[in-house]
Image (cartoon, rainbow, N blue to C red):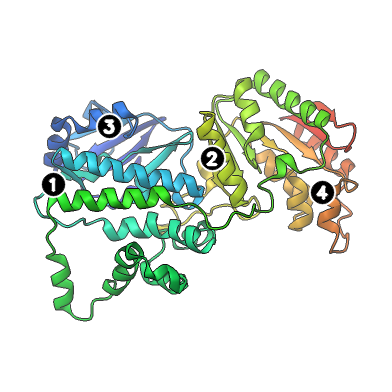
């Protein structure tokens, strides 16, 4: 089967991966809506604005084993990284929500609506969100209610409100639920003061009360609600204004958000490290660089400036992750920072464990940066050093790995409240483990801290 595992629910068409190409079949049940939307000119306008992924109609024969013969086949460009909403930073989820609303408002003006409001219909090209599901568009019926309202709230609004109102990061909860945060769950954790908000009452508390109608008649009544086009447009624009104003609760920085300015490096060492990363990137010019523990994206930016074409960062600290996304947007970097705990990465989940592949399965990088990382995995999380290094070496054929000695203040801080049982955490073990699987191309010893950076090429 060429069909993507996540593309099984829609009876109107599917996404197929064929020899490196991304193709979308439009089946007979979806023909009329597809033709109406295409001929309205809406897709081309959205593509020109960068809101919708590009698509061209190609020969039907491009899908020889697609099952039913499609009415049309579209080809899309392949994005560097496939990510899911539970891996996005707060500002990235917010940007995706705003895009979804903007696309819907523009569609309504063309006599088109969206059949759903799934956050999985958005992907990122670097830090820029782009809508990807052509078959979500269909002809608008006058007076119809917004069918995707609850889904939008669960997959966009409620996760954002959780972090904006309570300060709790939404990513772990979202990853566990996968389809978002139900309104009745969010309502139970919101403080009473938040419930006095008319918007919270409308989009959370009322949604919660309607989640389980008391009678079948109530359910039928809800399904018959009519909403004039002007009212629906106002609802979308009002939601947009509200979401645009949301920010994470509290102003205190998280543990590693200010690490770039508060670490054990001297200014000279930072310059040496940046030069080493730049030389690595300019030599290899990787199509995709993986920066594990990217913090606020400083070294991803260095690598991109030196020749890397695109980068994805993994970071588990919410404040640092938000900072990396802000840097990517402000500096127009081809960088997508994602929420990921290196010791507990996003697993495969969904239908049959195949619908949403794990983050490590989805990502094929040419080069990896693992800077100021391994002591957090080996000491703070008790993963044997050799296992940490093997896992990093599996991520890409080329990379830079930094060893931080026990004499470093950052490691001393980790060991401050626990017994040092880490006999294997030595520079000798570090070098030996890498040498068993890779050639050491170059090294950099930082003169003050004693940290060692190793540039490897995997055998």
Q: In this view, does 53 lie to the left or right of 106?
A: right
Cα separation, mark 4 vs mark 1, equals 58 Å
Q: Do the residues labelled 3 and 2 touch (CB within 8 Å)?
A: no
List x then y, in percent, for residue 81. Answer: 48, 37
Among numbered discs 4 and 1, the one appearing first in the sequence: 1
Label 4 vs 3, first from the N-terminus: 3
Residue 143 falls in image quadrant? bottom left
Pointer 2 residue: 325
* Label 3 secondary element: helix
Q: Distance between the residues labelled 4 and 2?
A: 25 Å
Q: Quadrant of the C terminus?
A: top right
Q: In which quarter of the image is the N terminus?
A: top left
Label 1 and label 2: CA atoms lie apart by 35 Å
Question: Residue 71 lies in what quarter of the image?
Answer: top left
Residue 410 has which mark? 4
Residue lying at 55% horizontally and 24% vertically, measured from the top left: 309
Label ID, residue 46: 3
Q: Position of residue 157 (x, y in %)?
A: 38, 56
Q: What element carries label 1?
A: loop
Please say if 30 is above or below 335: below
Mark 4 crowd level (few <14, some 14–19, many ≥20, 10 Å Cα): some
Report crowding for label 2: few under 14, some 14 to 19, many 20 or more residues within 10 A (C-alpha). Answer: many
Query: CA gap, disc 3 to disc 1?
Result: 17 Å
Q: What x and y, as percent, mark residue 373?
A: 73, 45
The answer to whether residue 29 is visible is: yes
Describe the element under mark 4 as helix, strand or loop: helix
Above or below: residue 205 compared with residue 159: below
Residue matched to label 1: 140
Identify which residue is drawn at 62% across, 32% down. Answer: 300
């Amino acid at each position: 089967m060429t069909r993507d595992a996540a593309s099984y629910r829609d009876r109107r068409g599917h996404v197929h991966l064929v020899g490196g190409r991304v193709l979308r079949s439009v089946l007979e049940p979806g023909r009329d809506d597809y033709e109406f939307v295409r001929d309205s000119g809406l897709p081309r306008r959205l593509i020109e604005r960068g809101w919708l992924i590009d698509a061209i109609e190609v020969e039907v024969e491009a899908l020889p084993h697609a099952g039913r013969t499609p009415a049309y086949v579209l080809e899309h460009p392949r994005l560097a990284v496939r990510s899911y909403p539970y891996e996005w930073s707060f500002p990235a989820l917010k940007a995706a929500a705003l895009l979804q609303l903007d696309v819907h408002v523009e569609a309504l003006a063309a006599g088109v609506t969206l059949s759903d409001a799934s956050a999985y219909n958005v992907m990122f090209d670097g830090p820029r969100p782009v809508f990807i599901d052509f078959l979500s568009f269909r002809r608008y019926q006058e007076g119809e209610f917004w069918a995707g309202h609850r889904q939008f709230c669960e997959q966009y609004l409620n996760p954002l409100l959780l972090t904006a109102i309570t300060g709790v990061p939404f990513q772990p909860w979202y990853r566990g639920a996968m389809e978002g945060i139900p309104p009745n769950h969010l309502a139970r954790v919101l403080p009473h003061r938040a419930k006095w908000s008319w918007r919270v009452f409308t989009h959370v508390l009322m949604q919660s009360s309607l989640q389980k109608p008391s009678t079948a008649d109530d359910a039928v009544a809800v399904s018959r609600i009519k909403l004039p086009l002007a009212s629906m447009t106002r609802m979308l624009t009002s939601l947009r204004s509200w979401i645009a104003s949301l920010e994470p609760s509290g102003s205190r920085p998280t543990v590693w958000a200010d690490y770039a300015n508060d670490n054990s490096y001297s200014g000279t060492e930072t310059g040496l490290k940046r030069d080493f990363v730049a030389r690595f990137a300019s030599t290899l010019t990787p199509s995709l660089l993986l920066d594990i523990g990217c913090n606020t994206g400083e070294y991803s930016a260095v690598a991109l400036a030196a020749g890397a074409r695109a980068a994805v960062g993994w970071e588990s600290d919410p404040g640092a992750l938000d900072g990396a996304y802000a840097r990517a947007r402000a500096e127009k970097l081809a960088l997508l920072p994602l929420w990921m705990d290196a010791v507990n990465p996003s697993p495969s989940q969904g239908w049959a464990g195949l619908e949403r592949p794990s983050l490590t399965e989805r990502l094929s990088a040419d080069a990896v940066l693992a800077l100021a990382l391994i002591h957090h995995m080996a000491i703070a999380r008790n993963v044997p050093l050799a296992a940490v290094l093997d896992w990093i070496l599996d991520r890409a054929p080329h990379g830079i790995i930094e060893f931080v000695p026990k004499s470093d203040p950052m490691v001393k801080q980790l060991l401050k409240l626990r017994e040092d049982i880490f006999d294997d955490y030595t520079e000798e073990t570090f070098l030996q483990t890498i040498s068993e699987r890779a050639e050491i191309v170059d090294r950099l010893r930082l003169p003050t801290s004693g940290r060692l950076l190793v540039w490897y090429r995997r055998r």
